[in-house]
Amino acid sequence: MQLQIKLVEITIADLPQIQVIDQACLGGFWSLEGYLQEIERPNSYLISVMSREKVILGFGCLWAILEEAHITMLAVRPEYQRQGLGKYVVWGLLEKAWSQGLEWATLEVRASNLAAIALYEKFGFTVIGKRPKYYEITQEDALVMWRKGLHYPEFKDSLQAWHQEIREVITLRGWEIV
Ligand SMILES: CC(C)(COP(=O)(O)OP(=O)(O)OC[C@H]1O[C@@H](n2cnc3c(N)ncnc32)[C@H](O)[C@@H]1OP(=O)(O)O)[C@@H](O)C(=O)NCCC(=O)NCCS
């Protein structure tokens, strides 16, 4: 299918789709109430990759806390995974953090989530710590990942280079970033 996609901020109208993706990918990480709070919270940025037909393919969330960008959510529709869209969402979050003048990005990820860890490493995140039994239900450890230097001049160049790579991968699929 020929897809035209773009990064957009999530609105209330998008929440039914967001909840479907959250349920499929994370088993319902946030409730509808939780998402509504995120939309209203001034320092929270919820973005999605959306097709021209307004189908949301993936999304992520970032909290801006002083100089820190805390990535709190990332998910791609299962049937669209492994096609570069996760990278595009993380790129969008980092671009937002950079445009807000934030200095570093951080996140927690399940120690077993090798796919997400590999994805974040592609953007220069490194593991800086562990929170034992961070996830209540499974008692699994969280790894804390960190990416410094968002305010360094070279970060803008990295953003441009990553965007080019993402565009190439998406173009190879016959899709288009608009
Ligand atoms: C993590 C997630 C968002 C990745 O999305 P995606 O669209 O599949 O990611 P991309 O196609 O952009 O892949 C980017 C990189 O991530 C890594 N990756 C993604 N899926 C992977 C997998 N199943 N196994 C190993 N590495 C994987 C690879 O390094 C990949 O780069 P490559 O394609 O050049 O090898 C997606 O798997 C997902 O929604 N998972 C469930 C929710 C989740 O775990 N969220 C993260 C919470 S911290």
Image (tube, rainbow, N blue to C red):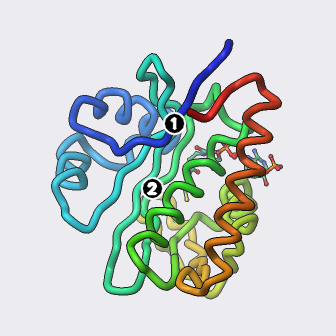
Instruction: Please indicate whether residue 106 sits to the left or right of residue 175 in the image.
Output: left
In-front residue for pair 68/163: 163
Regarding mark 1 in the picture, which secondary structure is present there? Answer: strand
Residue behind label 2 places its C-beta within 8 angstroms of ligand 1:
yes
Pointer 2 residue? 73
Instruction: Please indicate whether residue 173 sits to the left or right of residue 147 in the image.
Output: right
Q: Quadrant of the N terminus?
A: top right
- Residue 6's mark? 1
From this viewpoint, is residue 112 visible? no
Task: Say whether disc 1 or disc 2 marks the residue closer to the N-terminus.
Answer: 1
Residue drawn at 69 percent across, 79 percent down:
126
In-front residue for pair 152/15: 152
The extreme top residue here reads 1
- In the rendered image, residue 94, in percent from the top left (x then y), is placed at 53, 65
Q: Name the amino acid, label 2.
A: Met
- In the rendered image, residue 138, in percent from the top left (x then y), is placed at 51, 59
Q: Quadrant of the C terminus?
A: top right
Residue drawn at 78 percent across, 27 percent down:
173
- In the rendered image, residue 69, in percent from the top left (x then y), is placed at 43, 74
Q: Give the distance between the C-alpha atoms of the residues marked 1 and 2, in whole angstroms.
A: 18 Å
Q: Name the amino acid, label 1.
A: Lys
Q: Nearer the viewer, mark 1 or mark 2?
A: 1
